[in-house]
Image: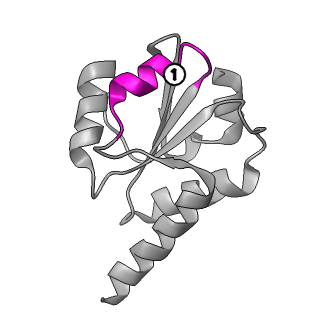
Amino acid sequence: MGFLDRFNAIQQADILKQWEVLDESVALAQLVEISHQKPVVIFKHSIRCGISSMVKNQLESDWDFSEGELEFYYLDLINHRAVSNAIADELGVIHQSPQIIVLKDGKAVYDTSHHMVSTRAIRQAI
């Protein structure tokens, strides 16, 4: 296992502690359905992008949501680009990275990217 593989494995382990991982095993239809009960936030992250890593770290350090307040999903764009494409197609949200998308009542009600991604932005959207 090379350095980059080990680095990505460490990043993935950190994510698993805090967020649900969005990959091919999670149907987008499930997230839309969940959003009728509580807000769903999708964080699209490029593991090869310094800005994306900075935004991810900032989200983690500022996290102030109580358990059960919302569902938060992490999407690794490099390894699951097809999922990102499906989100763009099915929810009508232009792909960006890093990006948050907030789903409520079955619809994408908010999205933002880059340095505008924050817990404050999520809080305002939900």
Measuring from the top left, give residue 107's x and y in whole percent: 44, 13
Residue pictured at 36% horizontal, 88% vertical: 3
Confirm whether residue 3 shows in the render.
Answer: yes
Magenta stretch containing residue 33, yes or no?
Answer: yes
Q: x%, y% of residue 93? A: 34, 25
Q: Which residue is mark 1?
A: 34
Q: From the top left corner, tell me how far across and down residue 73 is, in percent.
A: 50, 42
Residue 84 position, x and y percent, is 29, 39
Q: Residue 79, located in which quarter of the rendered image?
A: bottom left
Write the start and end of the magenta stretch as one range: 26-39
Seen at 62% across and 54% down, the residue is 18
Amino acid carrying mark 1 in the image: Ile
2 left or right, relative to 40: left
Residue 65 occupies which quadrant of the picture?
A: top right
Residue drawn 74% across the image and 51% down it: 62
Left or right: 74 as drawn, with respect to 27: right
Q: Is residue 11 above or below residue 120?
A: below
Q: Residue at x 78, y 38 (%)?
A: 66
81 or 18: nearer the viewer: 18
